Image (cartoon, rainbow, N blue to C red):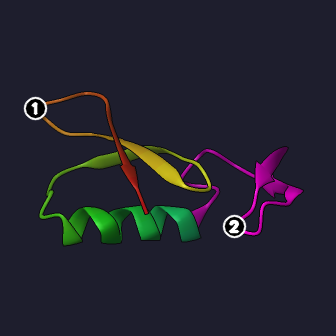
């Protein structure tokens, strides 16, 4: 985990611990796969997660970005 600085929904900067690795941040990984399921995207691999977005790859495209 590393410390990152984010602007929360109230417009206040806060520091929190975050891991961009989906295996270390299972909650974000689960949210990412749920969003992909809602969008009808199958066989995607989530390879990085951030507080508001995630990156994934499919067999057609290597780099894709989605929001929770």
**What residue is at 62 percent from the left and 45 percent from the top?**
20
Q: Tell me the SS state at disc 2.
A: loop
Q: Is the residue 51 above or below the residue 39 in the image?
A: above
Q: Position of residue 4 (x, y in %)?
A: 82, 45
Q: Is the residue 39 above or below the residue 23 in the image?
A: below
The residue that label 2 is drawn on is: 9
Q: Which residues are magenta?
A: 1-26
For residue 27, the mark is: none
**What residue is at 62 percent from the left and 56 percent from the top?**
51
Question: Is residue 1 visible in the rendered structure shown here?
Answer: no
Instruction: Kindly indicate the quadrant of the structure image that contains residue 9.
Output: bottom right
Q: 10 Å neighbourhood of mark 2: few (<14), some, or many (≥20)?
A: few
State the CA–CA distance, disc 2 to disc 1.
34 Å
Is residue 27 found left or right of 44 in the rendered image?
right
Circle count: 2
Q: 10 Å neighbourhood of mark 1: few (<14), some, or many (≥20)?
A: few
Q: Is the residue 34 above or below the residue 55 in the image?
A: below
Q: Position of residue 13 (x, y in %)?
A: 86, 54
Quadrant containing the C terminus is: bottom left
Q: Position of residue 38 (x, y in %)?
A: 21, 72
Query: Residue at the front extreme?
Result: 11
Mark 2 or 1: in front is 2
Is residue 57 found left or right of 48 in the rendered image?
left
**What residue is at 15 percent from the left and 57 percent from the top?**
41
Is residue 43 found left or right of 57 in the rendered image?
left
The residue that label 1 is drawn on is: 60
Residue 5: in magenta span: yes
Q: Tell me the SS state at disc 1.
A: loop
Residue 62: in magenta span: no
Labels 2 and 1: the sequence-earlier one: 2
């Amino acid at each position: 985990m590393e410390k990152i600085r984010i602007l929360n929904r109230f417009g206040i900067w806060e520091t929190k611990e975050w891991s961009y690795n989906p295996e270390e941040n299972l909650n974000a990984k689960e949210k990412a796969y749920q969003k992909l399921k809602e969008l009808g995207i199958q066989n995607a691999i989530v390879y990085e997660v951030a507080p508001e977005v995630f990156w994934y790859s499919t067999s057609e495209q290597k780099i894709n970005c989605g929001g929770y």
